[in-house]
Image: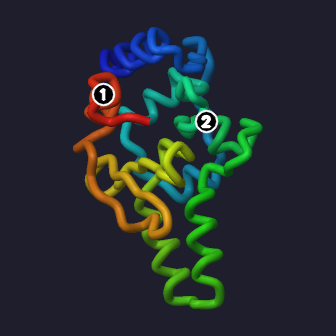
């Protein structure tokens, strides 16, 4: 997996992404709320977070959600769970709908956000490790784009997935 991450890092830098990598001695420290909510994060995604501090597309309209975003210390205008919040606002006082939204997001950790063509995100489905894509207005209606995180990175490099 580290090979796929390293290949992605090289590709991103070569393609003018704003990519900041971490020093090897930096320890990944995710917010306790994240760790409590998402107990079974895939190792390959954790390895990515251990290596990449920031990943923003060249047009600055898409970005990876990294440690600082999860810890609410990035300064980015969108919170890591922005699209969940938007869905919950739409549900208003409908408790069943709100519960369904929260339950869905409990099983899907967002990993990329985009505002390029409307609001779009990619998330890891924690039940099987697949990466799914969702768009507004029904964020929770997603479809799989990769069977695992490494394949997701590969598809970005190959141009199959574009931001």
Residue located 60% across and 12% down the image: 23
Residue 145 x %, y %: 27, 46
Left or right: 34 in relation to 3: right
Quadrant where the C terminus is found in the figure:
top left
Left or right: 75 in relation to 42: right
Label 2 residue SS: helix
Quadrant where the N terminus is found in the figure:
top left
**Viewer-nearest residue: 38 or 118:** 118
Of badges 2 and 1, nearer the viewer stands 1
Label 1 residue SS: loop
Q: Which mark is residue 159?
A: 1
Residue 27 x %, y %: 60, 25
Residue 81 x %, y %: 60, 56
Residue located 45% across and 34% down the image: 46
Residue 36 x %, y %: 56, 56
Give above or below for 19 relative to 124. Answer: above
- Distance between the Cα atoms at labels 2 and 1? 25 Å
First of labels 2, 1 by sequence position: 2
Q: Which residue is mark 2?
A: 67
């Amino acid at each position: 997996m580290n090979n796929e991450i390293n290949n992605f890092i090289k590709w991103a830098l070569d393609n003018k992404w704003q990519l900041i990598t971490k020093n090897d001695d930096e320890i990944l420290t995710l917010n306790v709320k994240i760790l409590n909510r998402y107990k079974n994060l895939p190792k390959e995604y954790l390895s990515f977070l251990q290596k990449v501090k920031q990943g923003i597309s060249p047009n600055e309209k898409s970005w990876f959600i990294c440690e600082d975003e999860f810890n609410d210390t990035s300064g980015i205008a969108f919170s890591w769970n922005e699209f969940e919040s938007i869905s919950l606002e739409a549900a208003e006082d409908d408790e069943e709908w709100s519960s369904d939204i929260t339950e869905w997001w409990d099983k899907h950790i967002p990993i990329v956000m985009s505002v390029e063509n409307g609001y779009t995100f990619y998330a890891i489905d924690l039940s099987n490790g697949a990466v799914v894509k969702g768009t507004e207005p029904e964020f929770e209606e997603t479809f799989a784009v990769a069977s695992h995180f490494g394949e997701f990175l590969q598809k970005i490099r190959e141009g199959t997935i574009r931001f």
